[in-house]
């Protein structure tokens, strides 16, 4: 493979990875995971779905920040 092709593949790969990380950092993704977690976790007094969603969103945010930083992207 020529150097130009390799450079193009590298930039394409970077673009694809960055788009996916941005998707994982989106509010829509956080909301989707948080809702699924809240449904799966039993409710307790003082720790119902709203609190479970806050915790789940925080965890998703921490994980996606780590992922973004590992890829030299910005945490959000
Ligand atoms: Ca729940």
Image (cartoon, rainbow, N blue to C red):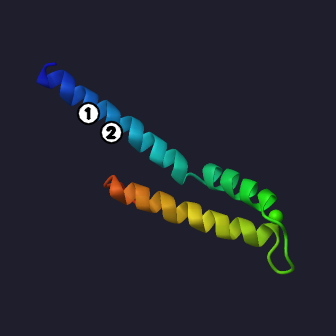
Please tell me which residue is depicted at 80% across the width and 66% down the height of the picture. 49
What is the count of numbered marks?
A: 2
Quadrant in which residue 19 is drawn = top left
Number of residues whose C-alpha sits closer than 10 Å to that of mark 1, classed few (under 14), some (14–19) or many (20 or more): few
Which quadrant of the frame does ligand 1 lie within? bottom right
Q: CA distance from mark 2 to mark 1?
A: 6 Å
Can residue 28 be seen here? The reply is: yes
Residue bearing mark 1: 10
| Residue 44 image offset from top left, x and y in percent | 85, 76
Q: Secondary structure at mark 2?
A: helix
67 relative to 21, above or below: below
Question: Are discs 2 and 1 less than 8 Å apart at CB?
Answer: yes
Q: Is residue 4 left or right of residue 69?
A: left
Q: Secondary structure at mark 1?
A: helix
Please tell me which residue is depicted at 31% across the width and 55% down the height of the picture. 72
Q: Is residue 15 left or right of residue 43?
A: left
Please tell me which residue is depicted at 78% across the width and 69% down the height of the picture. 50
Residue sitting nearer the eye, 40 or 8: 40
């Amino acid at each position: 493979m020529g150097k130009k092709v390799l450079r193009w593949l590298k930039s394409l790969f970077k673009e694809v990875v960055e788009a996916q990380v941005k998707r994982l950092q989106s509010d829509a993704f956080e909301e989707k995971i948080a809702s699924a977690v809240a449904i799966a976790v039993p409710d307790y007094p003082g720790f119902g779905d709203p609190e479970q969603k806050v915790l789940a969103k925080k965890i998703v945010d921490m994980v996606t920040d780590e992922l973004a930083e590992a890829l030299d992207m910005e945490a959000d």
